[in-house]
Image: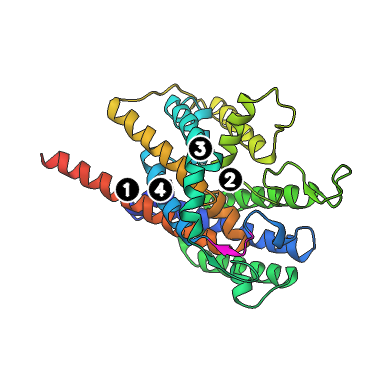
Amino acid sequence: MGSIADVFLMQDWTRALQWVVATSITLVGFGCLCLSGQIDPFKTLYFTNKWYWASTSVGGLMFGCGMVLSSGCGLKTLVRSGSGNLKSWVVMVVMAVFAFMTLKGLFGVVRVSTLDLLNLQIVGGANVPNLLGLDTALSFGTLGVVVGAILLILVFLKTVARQRHVISTGVLVGLMFISMWWVSGHLSFVAEHPDTLEEVFVGSKSNRAEAFSFVAPVAYLFNWLEFFSDNSNVLGNGVTSVFGVLLGSLVSSSLNSTFRWEGFANTEDLAAHLLGAGLMGVGGVSAMGCSVGQGISGLSTLSLNAFSAVVFIVIGAWMCLEYQSYRLNKSILD
């Protein structure tokens, strides 16, 4: 959200280029994992034979608008929560409730019976490699490495992208996502579970390889807390990553002396954040991921669903920023 706002308000592409670097590094890393046989691209959360164009577009729009109203996406909400922002705690709880309702509750029934029905069946997978006739893990990985490398070259042609903090931030974030792919898709993979004799990805709610995402995992965190006594309700990679972000933010803000309590300024501020949180919860699940889940994790698999989700997340955020700018200008003139 910050990178979109920077471009919209100040024509500053610094943070946007950090995101491109992070995504490109993740794309190269995911491709290398496929080439080395450490991960199967056809067994990830993002691999499907259906392009859910309606769900990802509507969900993306909702999420994009929601993250502007809530002053940040799901990940930023967690970071702000760990540094003492009480507004973000409210956003996190409301987003979790609406996300779980969209996963398995009332909104989930509506989603499955409406938006999810509007899809395009693509034999071989709804992803770029399949559209190009590349149907093996090796060719999948090769395309990922090539596309990621080309993106990096194009980005570094811009002077602003060659700044040390842009490169270091993008590379470090990308390496974290690659690590998560390796843990989820390789380290946690069991070819034959001793109880079921079936293959399983330990720690994955979807029983597929998955990287970071911060909408559904937040919902599963609260579900785990609410049903703590249920021995079948175990922690997964997504939930533990939520704990990690909260703890990392707390430690960082404490060391940098930036931890401070912050509440809502007025009723209008509260209403905007509540609406934004609800939109992020519903939109993040409908779009099959958030600005992180689709914007980096999904794009690294060259998924068509990720591309459409990201495009509409940007459009939704841009529309909401335009509306906020219009309201601000109108209030000044009045």
Identify which amino acid the numbered label 1 is placed on: Cys
Q: Does 323 appear above or below 273?
A: below
Q: Residue at image x 48%, y 39%? A: 106
Q: Secondary structure at mark 1?
A: helix
Q: Residue 122, image x and y in percent?
A: 59, 70
Provide the residue span drawn in magenta. 47-51
Distance between mark 1 and mark 3 Cα atoms: 24 Å
Residue at horizontal 50%, vertical 58%?
A: 117
Reading the chain from its start, which is encountered first: label 1 or label 3?
Answer: 3
- Which residue is rendered at x = 27% and y = 44% of the image? 324
x and y percentages locating residue 192 in the rendered image: 87, 50
- Residue carrying label 3: 101
315 or 130, which is in the foreground? Answer: 130
Name the spot of residue 101 as percent of width and height, x first. 51, 37
Residue denoted by label 4? 62
First reached walking from the N terminus: tag 4 or tag 1: 4
Residue 320's label in the rendered image is: 1
Mark 3 is surrounded, within 10 Å at the Cα level, by few (under 14), some (14 to 19) or many (20 or more) other residues, namely some
Q: Amino acid at mark 2?
A: Ser
